[in-house]
Image: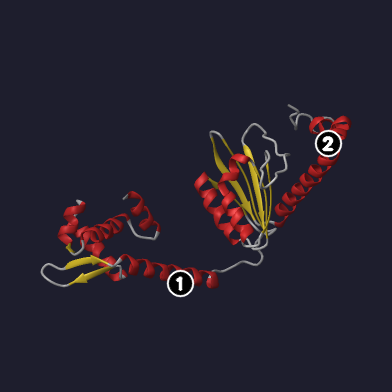
């Protein structure tokens, strides 16, 4: 019941409007008095709500003593709402002002649900290429979306900690101790960089700034180069530079890499 009410609220109906609609759908033709009694709400509030719903076309009104009300059949209701939403979205795409001088913005998305919803929408819109760096724990978030993109013909490159039989990963990602990092670049334009861990809520930075896309793609290119070199020269690289290239990194950034 609560989930149904939540979806109706998401469609722009108030709490009371949603409850009245569900009540009418469940009990068919009713008077305002009967609806108010079932919901435990004042008749004046229910009658005002019914009038709004009738004016929106989602509730049918039958005159009489007393007047009676009924909910539109669900198929008609959903078609009507879908048409209204499509019309509004189409109008916004055409008429919403766009500043040509505004620089691409950076913004933060907090919470696993919001990060997942935004990421799913952008992955569905990918046309040419998706490049991602993720940990195995986060791979389950959007693996299905990546595979669907591949089926659409989108080029997908992704690296993650560990080895996967179907999609071999590059094992250069390292846990900094404060959470697991993940990042994506979609069509060399849309970027997300985030972090998540046990006891750490998901948080991500999102931008279409070309500099961020360039930095992430350079990072990925370096990972690919190192991966190929380690496959060909692994033991020699360890002998000359130390495990995890510690011999090089310690000269410039001591302590940045763990050799355990």
How far is disc 1 from disc 2 in space, using C-alphas?
Answer: 58 Å
**Precedes in sequence: disc 1 or disc 2:** 1
**Looking at the image, which residue sits at the far left?**
65
Mark 1 touching mark 2, by CB under 8 A? Answer: no
Quadrant housing residue 85: bottom left
Mark 2 secondary-structure assignment: helix
Question: In screen coordinates, is 20 left or right of 154?
Answer: left
In the visual, does 119 lie left or right of 237?
Answer: left
Task: Name the residue at 16% across, 58% down.
Answer: 34
Labels in figure, total: 2
**Element under label 1?**
helix
Residue wearing tag 1: 87
Q: Which residue occupies the foreground of this view, 36 or 169?
A: 169
Tell me if I can see residue 111 in this picture. Answer: no
Most distant residue in the front direction: 165
- Quarter-wise, where is residue 70 in the image? bottom left
- Residue 187's disc is none
Specify few, some or many for label 1: CA neighbours under 10 Å numbering under 14, 14-19, or 20 or more. few
The residue to which callout 2 is attached is 234
Residue 35 at x, y = what percent? 19, 58
Depth check, front residue: 225 or 235: 235
Quarter of the rendering occupied by the C terminus = top right
Q: Residue 175 placed where, x, y %?
A: 67, 34
x, y percentage for residue 167?
67, 47
Query: Where 258 falls versus 40 (above or below)?
Result: above
Q: How is the image coloured?
A: secondary structure
Tell me if mark 2 has few (under 14), some (14-19) or many (20+) residues whose alpha carbon lies within 10 angstroms of its own.
Answer: some
- The residue that appears at 87% across and 30% down in the rendered structure is 239
- Looking at the image, the residue that sits furthest to the top is 260
């Amino acid at each position: 019941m609560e989930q149904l009410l939540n979806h109706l609220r998401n469609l722009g109906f108030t709490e009371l409007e949603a409850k009245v609609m569900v009540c009418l759908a469940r009990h068919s033709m009713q008077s305002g008095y009967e609806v108010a009694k079932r919901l435990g709400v004042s008749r004046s509030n229910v009658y005002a709500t019914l009038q709004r719903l009738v004016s929106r076309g989602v509730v049918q009104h039958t005159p009489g003593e007393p007047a009676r009300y009924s909910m539109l059949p669900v198929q008609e209701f959903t078609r009507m709402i879908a048409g209204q939403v499509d019309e509004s979205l189409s109008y916004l795409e055409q008429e919403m002002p766009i500043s040509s001088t505004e620089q691409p913005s950076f913004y933060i998305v907090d919470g696993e649900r919001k990060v997942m919803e935004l990421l799913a929408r952008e992955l569905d819109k990918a046309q040419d290429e998706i490049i991602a760096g993720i940990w195995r724990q986060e791979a389950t978030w959007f693996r299905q979306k990546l595979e669907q993109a591949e089926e659409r013909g989108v080029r997908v490159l992704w690296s993650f900690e560990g080895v996967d039989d179907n999609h071999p990963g590059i094992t250069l990602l390292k846990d900094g101790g404060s959470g697991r990092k993940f990042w994506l670049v979609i069509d060399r334009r849309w970027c997300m960089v985030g972090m998540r861990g046990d006891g750490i809520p998901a948080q991500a930075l999102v931008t279409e700034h070309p500099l961020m896309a360039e930095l992430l793609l350079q990072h990925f290119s370096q990972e690919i180069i190192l991966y190929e070199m380690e496959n060909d020269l692994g033991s020699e690289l360890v002998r000359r530079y130390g495990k995890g290239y510690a011999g090089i990194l310690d000269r410039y950034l001591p302590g940045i890499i763990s050799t355990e």
